[in-house]
């Protein structure tokens, strides 16, 4: 039988290990534009962005050469538009500082606490609401050990969310140790992992990772972050299907982004691609107004119309809940209630 086409990774000379992929990520937008055969003089870039540029090569391979408007490129390119900061935009748009119980531990909602697992991501998304997060204080080596000690005394928390900086930047041995420790917290029922690494470096979904996710006593929710169907190639879907077959619950969370996915056909295609990979669309977040991201924003009325149209276009289980994070509410807010 002919081997299954592994999507765009076939163009890589050899399959890189995930650590090699991290190390060889593009760190200069001009290099990426050169790879994509795009003339940089056609684009007004912010030449010295405060939030660094970082794009793994696997992600670049999913972009369309020659297309300035490629929806994946747009998510990572530091445009000069980032320098404008309209009123209403801030460095901490979701008021995380107010909910940091300890550096690296956030509790906003009942029964769920969030650990900032690492201080970096494999990719830097220009719309990221944590682009200014004080990671240095929050992460330090083995900081999580102290957080686990604290959680043992906090009987309210039933679910731990590992978020980011991307938790899958920890290697399997480190993650296993963390999961084992979390497993000893008696009141804990669930472990949730939020990560964009499967989308950017699919080889990070190793057999070792699958083992630790299936061997923990905790119920696991694995939430990937994909914004566009072009991000979901065969290299990713085959690995997600394997995780699902092993018993891991898979969800997706997206951000609604102007000129990336603000379109019914694009969002429908995303939901369908996710479902084919055994992933359930969970949330579609309206943009958090972080300084530098205004060019991605959409008015609320437009978002509401999109949600309605999507609902008319798809089975209900493929329509993510459109939510906005309104600081100091006791849950994310479905936009239908705003
Ligand atoms: C979004 C978020 C959660 C999870 O909320 P769900 O509605 O359960 O997905 C938990 N903690 C923090 C700090 C969050 O921002
Ligand atoms: S992967 Fe997530 S946390 Fe990391 S830069 Fe992108 S949006 Fe931000």
Image (cartoon, rainbow, N blue to C red):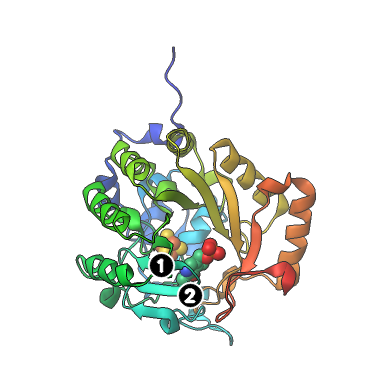
Quadrant of the frame with the C terminus: bottom right
- Would you say residue 118 is visible in this rendering? yes
Q: Position of residue 18 (x, y in %)?
A: 29, 45
Sequence-wise, the earlier of marks 1 and 2 is: 2
Task: State left or right for residue 209 relative to residue 39.
Answer: left
Q: Report helix, strand or loop for mark 1.
A: strand
Q: Residue at x 43, y 49 (%)?
A: 220
Contact between marks 1 and 2 (CB within 8 A): the answer is yes
Q: Residue at x 45, y 23 (%)?
A: 4
Q: Is residue 2 above or below residue 198?
A: above
Q: Position of residue 287 (x, y in %)?
A: 58, 70
How dense is the environment of label 1, judged by Cα within 10 Å: few (below 14), some, or many (20 and up)? many
Q: In the displayed image of the protein, which residue is found farthest to the bottom?
A: 87
Answer yes or no: disc 1 within 8 Å of ligand 1. Answer: yes
Q: Position of residue 71 (x, y in %)?
A: 56, 54
Task: State left or right for residue 57 relative to residue 180.
Answer: right
Answer yes or no: disc 2 within 8 Å of ligand 1. Answer: yes
Q: Report helix, strand or loop for mark 2.
A: strand
Q: Position of residue 19 (x, y in %)?
A: 25, 47
Residue in front for this viewpoint, 225 or 30: 225
Classify residue 182 by image quadrant: bottom left
Residue in front for this viewpoint, 215 or 87: 215
Residue at the disc numbered 1: 114
Q: Residue at x 33, y 69 (%)?
A: 151
Q: Which mark is residue 108?
A: 2
How dense is the environment of label 2, judged by Cα within 10 Å: few (below 14), some, or many (20 and up)? many
- Would you say residue 65 is visible in this rendering? no
């Amino acid at each position: 039988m002919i081997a299954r086409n592994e999507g765009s990774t076939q163009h890589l000379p050899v399959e890189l290990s995930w650590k090699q992929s991290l190390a060889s990520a593009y760190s200069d937008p001009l290099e990426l534009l050169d790879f994509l055969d795009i003339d940089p003089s056609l684009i007004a870039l912010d030449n010295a962005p405060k939030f660094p540029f970082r794009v793994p090569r696997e992600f670049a391979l999913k972009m369309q050469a020659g297309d300035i408007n490629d929806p994946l490129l747009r998510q990572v390119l530091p445009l000069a538009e980032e320098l404008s900061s309209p009123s209403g935009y801030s460095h901490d748009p979701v008021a995380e500082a107010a909910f940091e119980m300890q550096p690296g531990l956030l509790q906003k909602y009942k029964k769920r606490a969030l650990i900032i697992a690492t201080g970096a991501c494999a990719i830097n998304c220009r719309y990221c609401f944590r682009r200014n997060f004080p990671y240095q204080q929050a992460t330090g080596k083995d900081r999580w050990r102290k957080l686990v000690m604290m959680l043992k005394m906090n009987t309210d928390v039933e679910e731990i969310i590992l978020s980011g900086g991307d938790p899958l930047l920890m290697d399997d041995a480190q993650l296993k140790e963390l999961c084992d420790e979390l497993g000893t917290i008696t009141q804990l029922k669930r472990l949730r992992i939020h990560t964009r690494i499967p989308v950017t470096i699919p080889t990070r979904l190793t057999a070792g990772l699958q083992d630790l996710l299936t061997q923990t006593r905790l119920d696991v929710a694995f939430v990937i972050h994909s914004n566009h169907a072009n991000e979901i190639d065969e290299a990713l879907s085959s690995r997600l299907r394997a995780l699902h077959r092993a018993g891991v619950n898979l969800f997706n969370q997206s951000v609604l982004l102007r000129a990336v996915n603000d379109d019914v056909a694009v969002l429908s295609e995303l939901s369908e691609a996710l479902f084919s990979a055994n992933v359930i669309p969970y949330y579609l977040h309206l943009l958090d107004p972080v300084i530098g991201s205004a060019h991605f924003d959409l008015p609320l009325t437009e978002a509401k119309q999109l949600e309605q149209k999507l609902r008319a276009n798809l089975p209900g289980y493929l329509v993510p809940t459109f939510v906005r994070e309104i600081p100091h509410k006791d849950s994310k807010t479905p936009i239908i209630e705003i």
